């Protein structure tokens, strides 16, 4: 019986380890299929400047205030770790609009996640050329089934992860596709667009 219990515990540990998400190594906005946004902040720090427990208390207080003002649990602290002179924090936003509202007060951050049609209704201009994943120029009309496609729009210099394959990005050179579902916005810009399935 003890051997069976040990085997079950071992299998559970392996299962949990295999399912754990990999935390990005740089500042990243990640969006899942439901539109939940995880913002990862990676920052160097000195122990003389930060006490992680004090920092955690401050962040949780700020999150509590934000959620009370919104009347919902729109924002949660997912991770706060300090290792080898680096602090890693992950905040989870129920929707992109909460990220924009939370950070917009500090930095005029823009973050939109939705369909191409919703982006147009929100006032974003997606006319003109885009750079496709294969490096050629394209536009929305040349994409198959554009009505079902999603777009992420930001003005920040940041890494971006989306839940499906990236089809095309803003052609300015400020957005570079790194992997099928990952891109980086290299510099702050008025409107960086990442269109994905």
Image (tube, grey):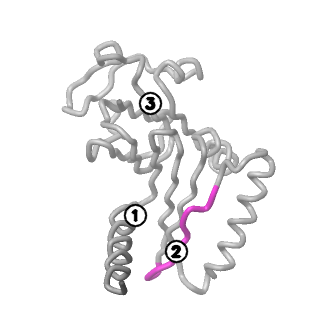
- Say which residue appears at 47% left-offset and 65% top-offset: 42
* Residue that carries the numbered disc 2 in the rendered image: 81
Disc 1 is placed on an element classified as loop
* Residue that carries the numbered disc 3 in the rendered image: 151
Can residue 194 be found in the magenta stretch?
no
Q: Return the x and y of residue 83 as percentages of the image width and height.
A: 46, 80
- Say which residue appears at 46% left-offset and 22% top-offset: 116
Residue 78 sits in quarter? bottom right
Q: Left or right of 160: which side holds 106?
A: right
Q: Residues within 10 Å of mark 2 (few under 14, many from 20)?
A: few
- Say which residue appears at 61% left-offset and 79% top-offset: 52
**Mark with earlier residue (2, 3):** 2
Q: Return the x and y of residue 176 as percentages of the image width and height.
A: 31, 42
What label does residue 20 carry, if any?
1
Q: Is 35 above or below relative to 24?
A: above
Query: Separation of disc 2 and disc 3 at Cα?
Result: 31 Å
């Amino acid at each position: 019986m003890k051997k069976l219990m040990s085997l079950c515990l071992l299998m559970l540990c392996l299962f949990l380890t295999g399912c754990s998400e990999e935390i990005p190594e740089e500042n990243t906005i990640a969006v899942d299929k439901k539109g939940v946004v995880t913002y990862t902040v990676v920052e160097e720090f000195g122990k003389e400047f930060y006490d992680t427990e004090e920092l955690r208390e401050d962040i949780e207080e700020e999150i509590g205030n934000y959620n009370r003002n919104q009347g919902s649990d729109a924002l949660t602290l997912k991770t706060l770790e300090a290792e080898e002179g680096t602090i890693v924090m992950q905040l989870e936003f129920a929707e992109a609009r909460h990220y924009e509202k939370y950070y917009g007060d500090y930095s005029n951050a823009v973050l939109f996640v939705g369909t191409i049609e919703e982006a147009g209704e929100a006032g974003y201009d997606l006319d003109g050329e885009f750079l496709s994943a294969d490096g050629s120029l394209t536009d929305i009309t040349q994409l198959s089934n554009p009505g079902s496609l999603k777009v992420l729009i930001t003005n920040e210099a940041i890494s971006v992860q989306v839940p499906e394959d990236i089809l095309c990005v803003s052609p300015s050179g400020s957005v570079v596709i790194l992997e099928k579902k990952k891109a980086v916005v290299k510099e702050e810009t008025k409107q960086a667009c990442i269109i994905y399935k």
